Image (cartoon, rainbow, N blue to C red):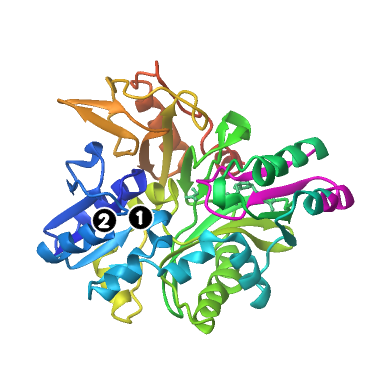
């Protein structure tokens, strides 16, 4: 088989690497990919929003199926376009991807199908939203309605902070069209869990859990980012907790989308707050998490290409998982998620078991930084603690003049695992 992965980040590097492991896969293409994944996939110089050229490429090269990594092309309707062209593609249609692309769509779906989530209200006028904040007080969560690369969310503990976030979105248009509406949401207390599943219509096959680290700095300080590191499994939660989240969240969401006439195919990701009352949804994503994919896929023992094909053909593939733990740490450009310098040489790299590249370019033989999140280094070990020690030991080699990383990835789990 020849397969095509669309996207250019660490998640796509991890998807490509897992597909390349299969003895049924002769060739993995990535469009556009990045120069750090060249040993894994042949990178094709076609952007993820150029659907027409991607379709031509898939046809000309007899690609068996295409996997779409990021949300933007999904919301642009890439799956609809591939399907119209008669091509096999793994990802949700534009209509189904709205579960990620519009928080108000996701919220009303949850309301209709009794999926637990924080209470909320949607506003487009600053004054009305400010009134609501005045009346309801803090803490409160303020979210731009549309896609904002994980940065459109403010958890406000003071009214001043809440009103500033509101004004950024509705008055200063900091998120453009994505912020024409704002969702004000109840603050949920608990620990977070990312739970992803392979979905095709009513079929929901959960993966193992993972935990992301959204804040930029140690101790969950600093601004929200796309994710600074992750680990799997999450020993804070039992199999019963996971089963409950599948039963109360993922399955009703998939079934709900079928009933609404926008059946979901692809990876459904539930960002959950595990509260005292049970799991509650913080967000849905219509794709693999980044960096969750980079720690979950290395634990998948089943052949990813067979899983996807069986699912697309209406089957119910069984997943086999390694009992080992994987922990991954993101190295980002200094300044991320704010502004940062680009095109700095990546000179000394960690010799990690898993090294997934994201924001990189190449000049001659030299890899250069070219984005916020630059790479993720991960290790697998029998326990999280050992995986953590191994990752950080190898990261010591990384030249950090232009890069930074958190040094506490996994600590919450390791602390409890040990006690
Ligand atoms: P999101 O982009 O929706 O995943 O939100 C980013 C981060 O903000 C989440 O990972 C949580 O840490 C936090 N967050 C979002 N919604 C809530 C909520 N309702 N209560 C508490 N924290 C939240
Ligand atoms: N790591 C969170 C996300 O992919 O949205």
Residues 267 and 72: in front is 72
Residue 369 location, quadrant: top left
In the rendered structure, the answer to whether residue 290 lies left or right of residue 235 reads left
Mark 2 Cα-neighbour bin, 10 Å: few <14, some 14–19, many ≥20: many
In the rendered structure, the answer to whether residue 143 lies left or right of residue 256 reads right
For label 1, the residue is 69
Q: What's the residue at 52%, 29% (across, down)? A: 338
Label 1 close to label 2 by CB (< 8 Å)? yes
Residues 228 and 146: in front is 146
Q: Quadrant of the C terminus?
A: top right
For label 2, the residue is 5
- Over which residues does the magenta segment extend? 131-158
**Which of the numbered marks, if any, corresponds to residue 23?**
none
x and y percentages locating residue 221 in the rendered image: 63, 31
Q: Secondary structure at mark 1?
A: loop
Whether residue 246 appears in this view of the structure is yes
Cα–Cα span, label 1 and label 2? 7 Å
Residue 372 location, quadrant: top left
In the picture shown, does residue 205 fall above or below 299?
A: below
Q: What's the residue at 36%, 48% (across, down)? A: 11
């Amino acid at each position: 088989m020849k397969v095509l992965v669309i996207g250019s980040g660490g998640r796509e590097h991890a998807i490509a690497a897992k597909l390349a492991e299969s003895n049924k896969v002769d060739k993995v293409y990535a469009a556009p990919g990045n120069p750090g994944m060249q040993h894994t996939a042949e990178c094709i110089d076609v952007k993820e929003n150029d659907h027409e050229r991607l379709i031509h490429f898939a046809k000309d090269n007899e690609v068996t199926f295409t996997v779409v990594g990021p949300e933007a092309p999904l919301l642009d309707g890439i799956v609809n376009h591939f399907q119209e062209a008669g091509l096999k593609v793994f990802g949700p249609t534009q209509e189904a991807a709205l579960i990620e692309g519009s928080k108000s769509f996701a919220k009303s779906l949850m309301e209709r199908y009794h999926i637990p989530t924080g209470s909320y209200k949607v506003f487009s006028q600053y004054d009305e939203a400010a009134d609501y904040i005045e009346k309801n007080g803090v803490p409160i969560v303020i979210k731009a309605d549309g896609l904002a690369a994980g940065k459109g969310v403010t958890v406000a503990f003071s009214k001043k902070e809440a009103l500033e976030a509101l004004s950024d979105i509705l008055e200063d248009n900091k998120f453009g069209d994505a912020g024409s509406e704002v969702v004000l949401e109840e603050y949920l207390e608990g620990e977070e869990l990312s739970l992803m599943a392979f979905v095709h219509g009513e079929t929901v096959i959960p993966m193992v859990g993972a935990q992301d680290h959204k804040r930029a700095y140690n101790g969950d300080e600093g601004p929200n980012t796309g994710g600074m590191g992750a680990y799997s499994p999450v020993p804070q939660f039992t199999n019963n907790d996971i089963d409950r989240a599948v039963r109360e969240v993922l399955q009703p969401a998939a079934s709900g989308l079928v009933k609404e006439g926008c059946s979901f195919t692809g990876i459904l990701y539930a960002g959950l707050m595990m509260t005292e009352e049970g799991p509650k949804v913080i967000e849905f994503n219509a794709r693999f998490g980044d960096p969750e994919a980079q720690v979950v896929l290395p634990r998948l023992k089943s052949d990813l290409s067979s899983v996807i094909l069986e699912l697309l053909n209406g089957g119910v593939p069984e997943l086999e998982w390694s009992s080992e733990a994987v922990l991954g740490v993101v190295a980002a450009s200094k300044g991320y998620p704010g502004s940062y310098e680009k095109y700095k040489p990546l000179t000394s790299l960690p010799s990690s078991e898993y090294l997934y590249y994201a924001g990189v370019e190449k000049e001659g033989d030299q890899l250069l930084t070219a984005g916020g999140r630059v790479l993720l280094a991960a290790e697998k070990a029998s326990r999280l603690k050992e995986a953590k020690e191994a990752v950080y030991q190898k990261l010591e080699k990384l030249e950090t003049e232009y890069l930074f990383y958190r040094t506490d990835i996994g600590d919450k789990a390791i602390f409890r695992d040990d006690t």
